[in-house]
Image (tube, rainbow, N blue to C red):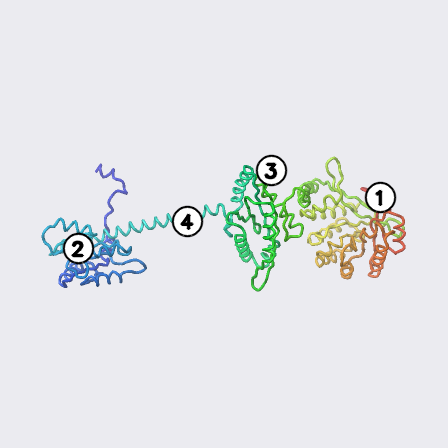
């Protein structure tokens, strides 16, 4: 009992259950022999013992035919062969040699029956050496033959289970190796295109920088950006966009050498690292690549898309004291410059590129603008506008300034372009509207204000509810409010801007079109744009008294505006002679240093 308790559960013998016996009794058995009586006797003994799936054969050909017929889906359903040594056409040894050549038959056991009644040790060794599972002598008895068959089938079943588990383990191991290989590949490659990814590029750049410095070589990093890829991606869908990216990747593989490192950096951005090259060859390679894609046409559902690329180049030389990240950043900056200069071009990185200076300037100014919005560092100044009709100042233009460190005052040219680029102009516009209305509540009723707004604010659905709310809260007469929008901004989003102008005019506010005449389509748009005042672009005014062409143009603008029932304002009036000419032409208002400079306080405010 103590010994049994020490035996682990996994080592104990599992008893045979009825279901196992039923499975063995359903096994397919082939009995083969020349003598019909012997074959019938063996079949009868097995049937009496419960075996039901028994086939008989009387020569070697019939045995082979039964084996072949038993194969289904690369598996043989024959579980046991009982072969009499008197079988003609094939011996047990020959049969075993044939069966061992095929996986379907290799595990099938063989019981060999011999006519010899004497114990023959040499014969036993010979037969067992030829793959015979059991050896029986005639005459057989019902007490010995069926149990031997049952034992052989049990061994066969165990072999099948072991083999199946081995195959399963081999399949799992193979799948794990495939998964491991895929994982290793995905660590350094892009899933969609199969090109290297940024991590792989940084590793390659580290090695390149080492070689360049140690051996005084020149290498180059090409940064390639597809121009207007978003148009196709949005029009046709991401799946079509992915198809194009794969085609582009294959084109890059065909253009560059297998020694070069091809990388997909982002959605439509690629990088190619070329080691050990020359400056002239780099530029020629880049121009060839640009020309390749300039003639590339992508077709989808009968739509044709003509492609182009912007290419930035960073030369890597021994003098560079850069990291891999610096090299990639400078190549990207060169590509940015190429796009800013018109796309479909090649640009070699230079630290003096104006585009990058502007970009860095924007990045530096953006947090200042955000801080000014939070800390109320914006201030308003007001420039008077003189009316020839009344002979006095009729209203004031509201101008925004930004207060910086040490009380420095920044003007719109310093921060408005940055705000437009960085998406902050909307918040500035709303700030101006709020504060201008609050200020007007403190002013006399005869003072009107002109409020400058960017073109983008007219696309914002918040503007109309805000103006309506401020008019209701302050009780200001809407006729005292003039909104100004530049001509170029109005034209860029004409229909939507026009809709918002109509809505705001319905509240009683007026509109002025600023910088009129700066665009090529001024008169065409004026015919359909619902504004009350035209502010003539200052470029026509600054030298008006000396330039005959400006005089003709300004006079025509005034005449056309009056013909359309609109009033006119001339900006940048700084000389009395200019004022006299404008009065002669019939202009309604003038604005400039001759009338007055912007001031922080209004009369009686």
Q: Residues within 10 Å of mark 2 (few under 14, many from 20)?
A: many
Q: Is 27 positioned to the left or the right of 536 in the image?
A: left
N-terminal of the pair, mark 1 or mark 2, is: 2
Q: Mark 1, mark 4: which one is toward the viewer? A: 4
**What is the C-alpha distance between the residues marked 2 and 4?**
45 Å
Which residue does the numbered mark 2 point to in the structure image?
Answer: 112
Badge 2 element: strand
Q: Is 422 positioned to the left or the right of 222 in the image?
A: right
Quadrant of the image containing the N terminus: top left
N-terminal of the pair, mark 2 or mark 4, is: 2
**What is the C-alpha distance between the residues marked 1 and 2?**
125 Å
- Tag 3 near tag 1, CB within 8 Å: no
The residue depicted at 13 percent of the width and 48 percent of the height is 121
Q: Residues within 10 Å of mark 3 (few under 14, many from 20)?
A: few
N-terminal of the pair, mark 1 or mark 4, is: 4
Residue 599 or 306: which is nearer the viewer? 306
**Would residue 446 be visible to someone looking at this image?**
no
Whole-percent x, y for residue 191 in the image:
50, 50
Q: Mark 3, mark 4: which one is toward the viewer? A: 3
Give the numbered dot on residue 319.
Answer: 3
């Amino acid at each position: 009992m103590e010994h049994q308790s020490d035996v682990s559960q996994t080592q104990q013998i599992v008893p045979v259950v009825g279901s196992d016996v039923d499975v063995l009794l359903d096994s397919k058995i082939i009995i083969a022999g020349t003598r019909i009586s012997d074959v019938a006797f063996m079949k009868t003994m097995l049937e009496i013992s419960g075996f039901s799936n028994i086939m008989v054969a009387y020569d070697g050909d019939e045995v082979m035919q039964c084996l072949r017929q038993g194969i289904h889906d690369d598996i043989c359903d024959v579980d046991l062969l009982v072969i009499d040594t008197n079988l003609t056409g094939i011996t047990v040894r020959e049969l075993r040699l044939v069966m061992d050549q095929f996986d379907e038959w290799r595990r099938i056991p063989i019981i060999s029956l011999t006519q010899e009644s004497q114990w023959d040790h040499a014969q036993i060794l010979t037969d067992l050496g030829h793959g015979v599972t059991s050896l029986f002598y005639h005459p057989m008895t019902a007490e010995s033959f069926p149990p031997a068959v049952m034992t052989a089938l049990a061994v066969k079943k165990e072999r099948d289970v072991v083999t199946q588990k081995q195959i399963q383990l081999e399949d799992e191991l193979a799948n794990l190796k495939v998964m491991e290989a895929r994982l290793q590949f995905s660590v350094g490659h892009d899933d969609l295109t199969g090109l290297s990814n940024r991590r792989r590029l940084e590793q390659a750049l580290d090695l390149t920088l080492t070689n360049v410095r140690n051996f005084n070589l020149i290498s180059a990093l090409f940064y390639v950006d597809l121009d207007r890829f978003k148009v196709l991606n949005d029009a046709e869908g991401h799946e079509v966009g992915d198809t194009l990216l794969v085609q582009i990747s294959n084109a890059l593989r065909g253009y560059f050498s297998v020694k070069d490192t091809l990388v997909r950096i982002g959605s439509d951005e690629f990088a190619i690292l070329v080691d050990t090259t020359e400056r002239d060859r780099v530029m020629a390679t880049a121009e060839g690549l640009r020309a390749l894609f300039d003639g590339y046409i992508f077709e989808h559902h009968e739509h044709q898309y003509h492609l182009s690329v912007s290419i930035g180049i960073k030369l890597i030389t021994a003098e560079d004291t850069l990291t891999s990240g610096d090299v990639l950043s400078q190549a990207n900056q060169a590509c940015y410059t190429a796009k800013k200069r018109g796309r479909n071009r090649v640009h070699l990185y230079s630290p003096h590129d104006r585009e990058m200076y502007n970009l860095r300037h924007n990045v530096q100014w953006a947090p200042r603008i955000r801080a000014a919005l939070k800390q109320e560092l914006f201030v308003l100044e007001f420039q008077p506008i003189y009316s020839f009709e009344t002979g006095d100042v009729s209203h004031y233009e509201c101008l925004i300034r930004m207060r910086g460190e040490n009380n420095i005052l920044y003007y719109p040219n310093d921060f408005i372009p940055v705000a437009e680029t960085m998406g902050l102009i909307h918040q500035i516009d709303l700030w101006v509207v709020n504060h201008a209305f609050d200020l007007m509540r403190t002013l006399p009723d005869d003072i009107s204000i002109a409020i400058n707004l960017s073109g983008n604010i007219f696309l914002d659905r918040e503007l109309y509810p805000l103006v309506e709310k401020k008019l209701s809260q302050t009780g200001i007469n809407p006729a005292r409010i003039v909104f100004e929008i530049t001509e170029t901004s109005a034209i860029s989003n004409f229909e939507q801007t026009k809709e918002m102008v109509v809505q705001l005019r319905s509240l009683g506010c007026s509109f002025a079109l600023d910088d009129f005449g700066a665009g090529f389509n001024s008169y065409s748009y004026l015919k359909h744009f619902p504004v009350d005042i035209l502010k003539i672009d200052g470029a026509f005014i600054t030298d008006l008294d000396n330039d005959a062409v400006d005089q003709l143009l300004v006079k025509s603008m005034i005449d056309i505006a009056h013909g359309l029932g609109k009033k006119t304002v001339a900006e940048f009036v700084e000389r009395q002679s200019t004022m006299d000419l404008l009065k002669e032409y019939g202009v309604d208002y003038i604005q400039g240093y001759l009338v007055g400079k912007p001031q922080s306080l209004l009369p009686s405010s």
